[in-house]
C-alpha cells in the first residue's frame, strides 16, 4: 500500500525547509522508504509498498513447572483468563501459546505520525493554539494522510487528518479532495509545483533566459519561497550604475531577492530579474511594482552615499565611541585602539596601521546602517573616494575576509594583517571575559573568526609563530581550528596533522610545508615501519623513565649494529642540515634498516649501567633530533588501524 | 484611485465587519502601534479581543526634515489585533488587501520570515513581512510573549504601513505626493510637522532636560507601581494605565536621546532595561487586575 502525508502549514522560512526534509526522510514507515518534498506551505512524505498490516505473532507465556502439578497450572490459566485445556507442556514447564493478531498499518501510523511530525526539530518554534499548545515552526492548518484509499486518522493542534489539500493561496482552490494517484497533478492544476527540483529548474531556466547571473544561494531561497515560480525582467535608470556595483548587487540580491544581469563579468546592466510566486504578469504590474521599489532603494543608497561623503572616515573615528562592540567589551573605538596596537606588533606598515584606524568607521555611515552586510566594503570604497592610498583602502575593503572557508583571503599584505589583527582581538577579548564557544553555542562566531585567522596565516605564509600569537587561554581552541583547517579544508589525514602539530614550533605556513612533505613521503616503503620504530623508542624511553641529561659517549658504542646506527644517524643528520623537508624526511626514513637491525641485535637494557644509559641516550637523541619535522610516533601505522 | 484617508476608511470598515472595535489613536507619543495599551496590555490574559486603530508612530532617528521621500519622523500605522488569532487569519488578511483595491491574482504576494522583538517591552513574536511586488506592506506577528509573560491566547498582530501602501496604490514615488484627501497632498498635511520635529529633535532639544524628564517619568512610574497592593479589594481602581503612560513617556524620551547619539554604549543596555522593568511591572499589575 502507498502512503501520502502532507503537513499543510503557513509559510515556513525557506532556509529551514531542507533541514526538515532531511529529518522526514528518516521517518519510520514500517520499512518503506520515505520520499520527501516541500513548498513553503507543505511538507510532503510519500512511500510505496507499505505492508497492510503487521504479521500475526505467537506470544509464549511461561507457566509453572510441570512438577508443581495440575492445580498450579489451573491457577495460572485462570489468571491468564484461559481454560486449563489451552495450556501446553514444553519440557519441564507449562506454557501458554497465544495468537496475537497483527495490527493494521493505518492504525499504527495513526499513533506514530503525530509524534513524529511534532517531533521535527526547528531552529525556532512557536505556539498558536494557546500557551500549552503544540509547538511547530508555523501553524499547521491542514493534514492529508492517506494509506491506499483510506485516511490515516489522527489530529494535531485541533486539525484532523483527511484527504483535502489546498492549492496556491491566490490562484488555487482552498479545498481539493485528492487521492495518492492524483495528488501531484491536482496540485499542479491548482498552481502548485510540488517538486522543489522542478521549481528550481524552472527558476534557473527562465532567469537565465532573461540574462540573470545565477546566484546559487538566491536560487535555493527562491525555490523555497515560491509554490509556482515565474521569472520576469525589469529595468532601472542607467544613471544608478554610477553607484558601486557592490551596493547595487547587494540591494538587488539581499534586499529584493533579485538576480542581477551581468552581460560581462563584473559589468552590470541596468536590469534585474525578479521571481514571482504567481503565474505571469501580463499587464506588467508586478514588474512596475518591483521597479519602483528598486528605484526607491537605489535612491536611498545614493542619498546615503552623498550624505556619508560629507564627513570623511578619518573624522568618524571618535564617533566609534558610540558604537557598541560588545556590551562587556566596550566600544569600537576601544577595539580600534587595540587592533592598531596589534597591527604594530605584527609589524604592519604605516598603511596597515592607517587601515586599522579607519577599518570600523564605516559602521557610523548611513550606508552600512542600511546595508550591514556591506561593512568593510563600504569603508574601502569610501576610503578610495576620499583619496586614501590604494594599500589602505584595499585593506579596509577586504579586512572581513575570509567570511567562510570558501571565501578567499585578503589579497594585500596590509589587508591580511588588519584582518588577522581584527579577528585575533575579538578572540582574545572574548576569551578574556569567558565568552567561549561551547557545543553549538557560538554567538560571536568565534570559530569562524579563528578559522579565518588560520586560513590567512597559512595561505599568506605570514611569519608569526603559532604559540606566542595564541597564548593561553586561546591555545587549545586555536589548535582545534588548525586541525580542522588542515583536515577538513585541506584534506590531510588526522594523524599527519597530529604528528606535525605535536612538534610544532613555528609558523602555520611551516606546519603546512612539513605536512605536505610528510604526506608525500608517507607512502614510501620505509616510512610507516620507521614510524612504528619511533613509537617503540618512545615506549622504551617512557618505561625506563629516561630523561637524557648527558651527552652520548662514543667510546661506549659497541661495534656492529649499535655503532652502525650511530654512524647512519650522524650521516643523516649532516645530510638534512639545510635540506628541504621532503628530502629530510626521505633521509630519515632511510634509517629504517639500521633501526630495525639495532632492535634485532642489541639489548638496550644492557647489564652495564653506563652502556645502558648510553644506549638510551642514543635513542633519545635520535628521537629528539628527528622529531622536529613531525613526531612520527603520532602516525597511525597499518598494523594499528585494525 | 483612493485617497490616503479612503484607504484607511476601507481597512477600518473591513476589520469592523470582522468584529474589531475601531479605536482611535492613543494620545501619547509611541514608537509603534504595538506600544499603545490597546495592544501592549490587551494581549495579556485570557479575554478575547479584536481591535483596529491608526497609530501615528514616532521614530526620531528617521526624521529627515521632510527631504527623504520614504523616511518619516512620524508615520501612520494601521494596527490590528485579533486575539486569539483565527485559523484563517492569513486569508482574512489577504481579503483586506483585496478590499483596498489590489487584485491578488495580478500581483505577487510573498510571506517572508521576519520575527519581531521589542526589548523595551519584554515582547517578541514570530511572523513575516508581507511583500507585495517586492514592497513590504505589512508586518504580521504571532505574539508569543509580552511584558515578560507567555501569552495565554496567541494574538495575531497586523501592522500596515499606510504611507507605503498608499504610495503603491497611487503610483507615486514620494510619500509627500500621496493624495491624503481629494485635492490635498500628504505634504500639505504633514510636511511642516516633519520639518519642525526634525529641527527640534536634531537641533534644539535640550539633552540634559530630556534626561531629567526621563528620570522624572521613571520615578513617577516606579512610585505608582510601588503603591499597588494585590490583596487590596480596591485594587481594580489602581491606575495602571496612567502608570503605563509614564512608561511610554520614558520610551519616547529614550528614542529622542538615542537619535541624538546622547546614549553612550555602556549606558544603552542599562536604559533599555530601565524601560523594560517599568513595562514588565505594569504588565504584571494589569494581568493581576484581569485575573
Image (cartoon, helix red, strand yellow):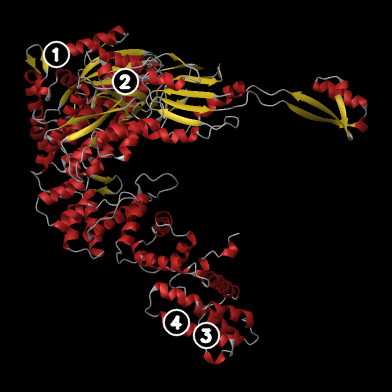
Q: Can residue A271 be spotted in the picture?
A: yes
Along the line of sight, the residue nearer the viewer: A470 or A583: A583
Comes first in the chain, label 1 or label 2: 1
Chain letter of the residue beneath label 2 in the structure image: B
Name the residue carrying label 3. Answer: A566
Closer to the camera: disc 1 or disc 4?
4
Along the line of sight, the residue nearer the viewer: A606 or A2: A2
Q: Are marks 1 and 2 on the same chain?
A: yes
State which quadrant residue A597 falls in: bottom right
Chain letter of the residue beneath label 4 in the structure image: A
Q: Secondary structure at mark 4?
A: helix
Could you say which disc has been placed on residue A573 in the image?
Answer: 4
Chain letter of the residue beneath label 3 in the structure image: A
Q: Is residue A415 above or below residue A100?
A: below
Along the line of sight, the residue nearer the viewer: A324 or A116: A116
Closer to the camera: disc 4 or disc 2?
4
Amino acid at each position: 500500500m502507498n502512503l501520502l502525508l502532507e503537513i499543510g502549514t503557513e509559510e515556513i522560512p525557506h532556509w529551514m525547509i531542507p533541514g526538515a526534509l532531511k529529518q522526514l526522510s528518516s521517518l519510520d514507515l514500517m520499512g518503506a522508504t520515505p520520499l520527501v518534498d516541500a513548498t513553503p506551505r507543505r511538507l510532503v512524505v510519500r512511500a510505496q509498498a507499505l505492508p497492510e498490516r503487521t504479521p500475526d505473532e505467537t506470544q509464549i507465556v511461561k507457566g509453572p513447572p510441570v512438577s508443581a502439578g495440575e492445580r498450579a497450572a489451573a491457577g495460572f490459566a485462570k489468571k491468564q483468563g484461559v481454560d486449563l485445556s489451552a495450556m501446553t507442556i514444553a519440557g519441564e514447564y507449562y506454557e501458554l501459546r497465544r495468537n496475537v493478531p497483527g495490527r493494521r498499518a493505518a492504525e499504527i501510523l495513526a499513533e506514530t505520525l503525530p509524534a513524529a511530525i511534532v517531533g521535527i526539530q526547528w531552529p525556532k518554534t512557536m505556539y498558536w493554539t494557546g500557551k500549552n499548545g503544540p509547538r511547530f515552526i508555523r501553524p499547521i492548518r491542514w493534514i492529508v494522510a492517506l494509506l491506499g484509499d483510506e485516511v490515516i486518522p489522527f489530529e494535531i493542534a485541533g486539525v484532523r487528518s483527511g484527504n483535502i489539500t489546498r492549492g496556491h493561496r491566490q490562484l488555487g482552490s482552498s479545498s481539493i479532495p485528492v487521492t495518492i494517484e492524483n495528488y501531484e497533478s491536482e496540485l499542479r492544476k491548482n498552481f502548485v509545483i510540488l517538486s522543489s527540483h522542478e521549481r528550481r529548474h524552472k527558476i534557473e531556466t527562465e532567469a537565465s533566459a532573461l540574462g540573470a547571473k545565477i546566484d546559487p544561494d538566491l536560487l535555493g531561497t527562491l525555490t523555497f519561497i515560491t509554490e509556482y515560480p515565474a521569472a520576469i525582467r525589469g529595468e532601472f535608470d542607467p544613471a544608478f550604475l554610477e553607484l558601486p556595483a557592490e551596493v547595487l548587487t547587494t540591494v538587488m540580491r539581499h534586499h529584493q531577492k533579485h538576480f542581477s544581469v551581468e552581460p560581462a563579468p563584473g559589468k552590470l546592466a541596468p536590469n534585474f530579474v525578479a521571481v514571482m510566486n504567481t503565474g505571469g504578469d501580463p499587464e506588467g504590474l508586478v514588474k512596475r511594482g518591483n521597479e519602483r521599489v528598486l528605484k526607491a532603494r537605489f535612491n536611498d543608497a545614493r542619498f546615503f552615499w552623498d550624505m556619508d561623503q560629507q564627513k570623511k572616515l578619518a573624522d568618524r573615528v571618535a564617533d566609534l565611541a558610540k558604537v557598541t562592540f560588545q556590551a562587556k567589551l566596550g566600544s569600537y573605538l576601544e577595539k580600534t585602539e587595540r587592533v592598531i596596537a596589534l597591527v604594530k606588533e605584527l609589524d604592519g606598515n604605516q598603511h596597515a596601521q592607517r587601515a586599522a584606524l579607519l577599518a570600523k568607521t564605516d559602521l557610523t555611515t548611513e550606508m552600512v546602517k542600511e546595508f550591514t552586510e556591506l561593512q568593510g566594503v563600504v569603508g574601502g570604497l569610501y576610503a578610495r573616494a576620499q583619496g586614501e592610498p590604494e594599500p589602505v583602502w584595499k585593506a579596509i575593503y577586504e579586512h572581513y575576509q575570509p567570511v567562510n572557508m570558501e571565501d578567499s583571503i585578503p589579497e594585500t599584505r596590509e589587508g591580511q594583517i588588519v584582518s588577522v589583527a581584527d579577528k585575533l582581538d575579538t578572540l582574545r577579548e572574548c576569551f578574556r571575559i569567558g565568552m567561549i564557544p561551547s557545543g553549538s553555542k557560538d554567538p560571536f562566531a568565534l570559530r569562524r573568526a579563528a578559522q579565518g585567522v588560520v586560513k590567512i596565516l597559512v595561505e599568506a605564509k605570514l611569519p608569526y609563530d603559532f604559540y606566542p600569537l595564541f597564548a593561553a587561554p586561546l591555545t587549545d581552541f586555536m589548535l582545534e581550528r588548525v586541525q580542522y583547517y588542515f583536515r577538513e579544508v585541506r584534506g590531510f589525514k588526522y594523524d599527519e596533522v597530529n604528528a606535525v602539530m605535536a612538534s610544532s614550533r613555528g609558523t602555520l605556513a611551516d606546519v603546512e610545508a612539513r605536512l605536505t612533505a610528510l604526506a608525500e613521503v608517507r607512502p614510501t616503503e620505509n616510512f610507516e615501519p620507521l614510524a612504528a620504530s619511533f613509537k617503540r623508542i618512545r615506549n622504551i624511553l617512557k618505561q625506563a623513565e629516561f630523561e637524557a641529561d648527558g651527552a652520548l659517549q662514543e667510546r661506549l658504542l659497541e661495534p656492529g649494529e649499535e655503532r652502525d646506527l650511530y654512524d647512519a644517524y650522524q650521516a643523516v643528520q649532516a645530510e638534512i642540515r639545510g635540506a628541504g623537508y621532503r628530502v629530510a624526511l626521505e633521509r630519515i626514513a632511510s634509517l629504517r634498516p639500521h633501526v630495525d637491525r639495532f632492535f634485532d641485535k642489541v639489548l638496550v637494557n644492557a647489564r652495564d649501567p653506563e652502556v645502558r644509559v648510553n644506549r638510551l641516550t642514543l635513542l633519545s637523541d635520535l628521537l629528539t633530533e628527528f622529531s622536529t619535522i613531525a613526531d612520527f610516533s603520532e602516525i597511525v601505522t597499518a598494523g594499528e588501524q585494525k | 484611485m483612493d485617497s490616503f484617508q479612503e484607504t484607511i476608511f476601507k481597512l477600518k470598515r473591513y476589520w469592523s465587519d470582522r468584529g474589531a472595535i475601531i479605536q482611535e489613536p492613543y494620545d501619547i507619543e509611541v514608537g509603534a502601534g504595538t506600544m499603545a495599551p490597546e495592544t501592549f496590555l490587551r494581549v495579556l490574559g485570557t479575554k478575547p479581543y479584536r481591535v483596529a486603530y491608526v497609530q501615528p508612530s514616532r521614530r526620531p532617528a528617521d526624521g529627515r526634515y521632510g527631504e527623504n521621500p520614504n523616511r518619516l519622523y512620524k508615520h501612520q500605522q494601521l494596527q490590528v489585533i485579533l486575539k486569539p488569532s483565527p485559523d484563517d487569519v492569513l486569508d482574512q488578511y489577504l481579503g483586506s488587501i483585496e478590499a483596498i483595491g489590489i487584485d491578488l491574482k495580478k500581483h505577487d504576494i510573498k510571506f517572508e520570515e521576519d520575527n519581531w522583538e521589542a526589548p523595551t517591552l519584554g515582547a517578541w513574536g514570530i511572523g513575516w513581512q508581507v511583500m507585495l511586488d517586492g514592497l513590504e506592506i505589512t508586518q504580521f506577528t504571532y505574539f508569543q510573549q509580552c511584558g515578560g509573560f507567555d501569552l495565554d491566547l496567541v494574538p495575531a498582530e497586523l501592522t500596515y504601513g499606510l504611507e507605503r501602501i498608499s504610495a503603491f496604490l497611487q503610483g507615486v514615488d514620494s510619500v509627500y505626493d500621496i493624495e491624503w484627501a481629494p485635492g490635498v497632498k500628504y505634504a500639505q498635511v504633514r510636511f511642516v510637522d516633519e520639518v519642525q520635529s526634525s529641527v527640534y529633535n536634531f537641533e534644539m532639544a535640550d539633552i540634559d532636560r530630556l534626561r531629567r524628564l526621563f528620570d522624572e517619568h521613571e520615578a513617577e512610574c516606579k512610585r505608582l507601581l510601588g503603591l499597588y497592593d494585590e490583596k487590596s479589594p480596591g485594587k481594580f481602581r489602581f491606575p495602571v494605565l496612567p502608570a503605563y503612560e509614564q512608561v511610554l513617556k520614558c520610551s519616547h524620551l529614550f528614542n529622542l536621546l538615542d537619535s541624538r547619539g546622547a546614549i553612550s554604549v555602556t549606558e544603552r543596555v542599562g536604559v533599555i532595561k530601565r524601560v523594560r522593568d517599568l513595562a514588565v511591572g505594569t504588565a504584571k499589575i494589569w494581568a493581576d487586575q484581569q485575573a
